[in-house]
């Protein structure tokens, strides 16, 4: 009993956690968990009961657990056993099962001593609880099995024979078969006395059990084996392709792989050979057929065009429309139509976009247009990368450039230094620096001795004649270059030094001095936030708080082991506390 009480406590905890304050317009302190058919389950004094739509108690709290009413029946637990009651509170089925769950709207699945059975809503037995309930369609051997898979018909085993029942528990396919598969396209494969046939969902034997083996029906065909050979039948049992193959696959998109005399080929639904059986292996992929012969690989199209096996390796590639092939350690490209687009000559190849491939020859990278079969960038670059998914960044002899792959031109010739940060990039040339945006447009001209690639609080620091200041995204110098040392802005404040060997001060985004130049270091404490979520958002956005009415906190260091708390309000020094 103690174990069951623990389970009930866990149930309540999980239910409350899942449902929150689920009061359903009930004003008393007694919690109500859910409502079905207008009746509400409630919990009071460690017991479950039911109230009607008006909140009146109709079945007093007397059960260890009570579940929802459905079709006038509710499941309840007493003394760790499940039973059924009606809306008068009378037992339809006295508590006797270890579990009761819905098999369908009209049938319950019951559990007793680790075995399962079926009962009706009024408690009448359909199947005695003596069945095993396996996982999914895992094949096991037992005299009584029921397979629960949320399908139209449920497979059962009775006295070692297999059949099917419907949602009401009624037998529709008599349990007389040695084995049965699931239903596919309205038919299930069944085995009777070592022969296979098919039954429909009404239990009618539509194809007699006369085959040595069968597959399920797919695309209107089922593979059948007779006298050690395979062929195909339709859903009426008509032989469409006589059994003559050593092995076949199910039809996929109108094609089947077939083996004859240890060689593989491909047939279509018209029973025609698309590929004659002369290959050691074939692999039907989405847009083509990969073929193998004498450990060499080729490709065939679905209209019968064949590129004979000649490659050492073949790899599925972009969208399975283009395939990489390898020959003598060189890479080429082949189309799904079995045409060689590029003879094997690259060391590496990878798709970029719009029929453009990045290729490598002699450890140099280029861009190749497979549609026009020509280079748009000769393989002479040391590396390539995506620049904000709009351009291709290239490295050439230690310099960088940006290539517009759509317009086939450089927007920046490879002669710059480029360093990106959050949508903007620092660009350097001959010791001077500017900034471009993600469209490779200059928003700050190349003229500064140094510049930060990042804008923080919409400001970036720059160097002019060995002095540092700050510019905005309009390239305006908003804080004059007069500092020896600066830091990026954070929450609207930046640490600055007038002289490298002197002390730090603190300025706001207007350049106003907030803390005097007298500190060895200044440490940010995160802004006050009403929640961890808001704090995370503030860290993410780095919002300028220098003009906020909220207080800001900093720890500052002045001399060894001496710290001050500085409280900033409205961007100004309010007061300080010596620790």
Image (cartoon, rainbow, N blue to C red):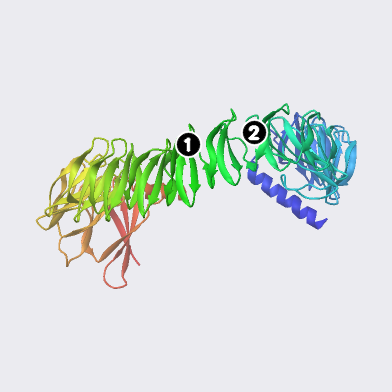
Q: Nearer the viewer, residue 538 or 429?
A: 429
Measuring 28% from the left and 35% from the top, which residue is drawn there? Answer: 372
Label 2 vs label 1: CA separation?
Answer: 19 Å
Q: Nearer the viewer, residue 2 or 223?
A: 223
Quadrant containing the C terminus is bottom left
Kindly give the residue lying farthest to the front in the view shown: 261
> Taking the image as drawn, is residue 168 in sight?
yes
- How many numbered marks, from 0 up? 2
Quadrant containing the N terminus is bottom right
Kindly give the residue lying farthest to the left in the view shown: 465
Q: Nearer the viewer, residue 289 or 101?
A: 289
Q: SS at mark 1?
A: loop
**Could you say where residue 489 lies in the image, as x and y percent from the top left?**
26, 52
Q: SS at mark 2?
A: loop
- Mark 2, Cα crowd under 10 Å, few <14 / some 14-19 / many 20+, is some
Q: Nearer the viewer, residue 202 or 214?
A: 214
Q: Quadrant of residue 548?
A: top left
Give above or below for 576 relative to 489.
Answer: below
Give above or below for 528 relative to 305.
Answer: below
- Mark 1, Cα crowd under 10 Å, few <14 / some 14-19 / many 20+, is some
Indicate left or right for 423 with 498 as reference.
right
Residue underneath mark 1 = 287
> Taking the image as drawn, is residue 550 in sight?
no
**Could you say where residue 280 lies in the image, as x and y percent from the top left?**
54, 48
Measuring 62% from the left and 40% from the top, which residue is drawn there? Answer: 249
Measuring 71% from the left and 41% from the top, which residue is drawn there? Answer: 31
Measuring 49% from the left and 47% from the top, which residue is drawn there? Answer: 292
**Could you say where residue 574 lies in the image, as x and y percent from the top left?**
29, 54
**Could you say where residue 18 lies in the image, as x and y percent from the top left?**
64, 43
Indicate left or right for 501 with 273 as reference.
left
Q: Earlier in the sequence, mark 2 or mark 1?
A: 2
Residue underneath mark 2 = 218
């Amino acid at each position: 009993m103690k174990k069951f009480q623990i389970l009930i406590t866990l149930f309540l905890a999980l239910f409350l956690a899942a449902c929150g304050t689920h009061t359903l317009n009930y004003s008393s302190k007694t919690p109500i968990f859910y409502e079905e058919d207008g009746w509400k389950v409630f919990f009071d004094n460690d017991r479950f009961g039911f109230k009607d739509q008006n909140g009146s108690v109709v079945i007093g709290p007397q059960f260890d657990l009570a579940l929802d009413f459905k079709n006038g029946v509710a499941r309840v637990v007493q003394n760790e056993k499940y039973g059924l009651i009606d809306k008068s509170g009378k037992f339809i089925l006295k508590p006797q099962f270890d579990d009761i769950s819905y098999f369908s709207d009209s049938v319950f699945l019951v559990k007793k001593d680790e075995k399962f059975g079926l009962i009706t809503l009024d408690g009448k037995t359909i199947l005695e609880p003596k069945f095993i309930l396996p996982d999914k369609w895992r094949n096991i051997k037992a005299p009584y099995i029921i397979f629960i898979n949320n399908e139209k018909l449920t497979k059962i085993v009775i006295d070692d024979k297999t059949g099917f029942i419907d949602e009401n528990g009624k037998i529709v396919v008599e349990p007389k078969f040695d084995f049965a598969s699931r239903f596919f396209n309205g038919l299930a494969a069944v085995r009777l006395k070592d022969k296979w046939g098919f039954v429909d969902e009404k239990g009618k034997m539509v194809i007699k059990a006369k085959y040595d083996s069968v597959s399920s029906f797919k695309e209107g065909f089922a593979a059948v084996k007779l006298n050690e050979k395979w062929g195909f039948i339709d859903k009426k049992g008509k032989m469409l392709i006589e059994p003559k193959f050593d092995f076949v696959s199910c039809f996929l998109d109108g094609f089947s792989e077939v083996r004859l005399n240890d060689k593989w080929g491909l047939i279509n639904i018209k029973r025609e050979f698309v590929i004659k059986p002369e290959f050691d292996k074939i692999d039907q992929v989405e847009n083509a057929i990969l073929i193998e012969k004498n450990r060499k690989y080729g490709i065939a199209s679905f209209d019968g065009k064949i590129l004979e096996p000649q490659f050492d390796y073949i790899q599925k590639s972009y969208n399975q429309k283009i395939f990489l092939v390898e020959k003598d350690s060189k890479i080429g490209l082949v189309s799904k139509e079995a045409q060689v687009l590029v003879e094997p000559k690259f060391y590496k190849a990878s798709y970029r976009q719009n029929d453009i491939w990045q290729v490598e020859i002699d450890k140099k990278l280029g861009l190749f247009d497979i549609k026009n079969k020509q280079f748009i960038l000769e393989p002479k670059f040391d590396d390539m990368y995506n620049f904000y998914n709009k351009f291709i960044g290239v490295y050439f002899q230690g310099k960088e450039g940006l290539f517009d792959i759509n317009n086939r031109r450089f927007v920046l010739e490879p002669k710059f230094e480029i360093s990106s940060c959050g949508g903007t990039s620092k660009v350097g040339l001959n010791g001077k620096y500017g900034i471009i945006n993600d469209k490779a447009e200059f928003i700050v001209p190349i003229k500064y001795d140094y510049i930060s690639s990042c804008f923080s609080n919409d400001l970036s620091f720059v160097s002019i004649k060995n002095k540092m200041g700050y510019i905005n995204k309009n390239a305006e110098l908003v804080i004059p270059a007069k500092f020896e040392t600066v830091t990026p802005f954070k929450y609207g404040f930046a640490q600055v030094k007038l002289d490298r060997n002197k002390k730090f001060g603190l300025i706001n985004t207007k350049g106003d001095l907030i803390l005097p130049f007298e500190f060895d270091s200044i440490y940010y404490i995160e802004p006050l936030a009403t929640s961890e979520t808001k704090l995370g958002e503030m860290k993410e956005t780095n919002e300028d708080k220098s003009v906020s009415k909220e207080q800001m906190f900093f720890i500052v260091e002045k001399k060894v082991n001496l710290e001050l708390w500085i409280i900033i309000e409205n961007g100004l020094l309010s007061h300080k506390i010596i620790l």
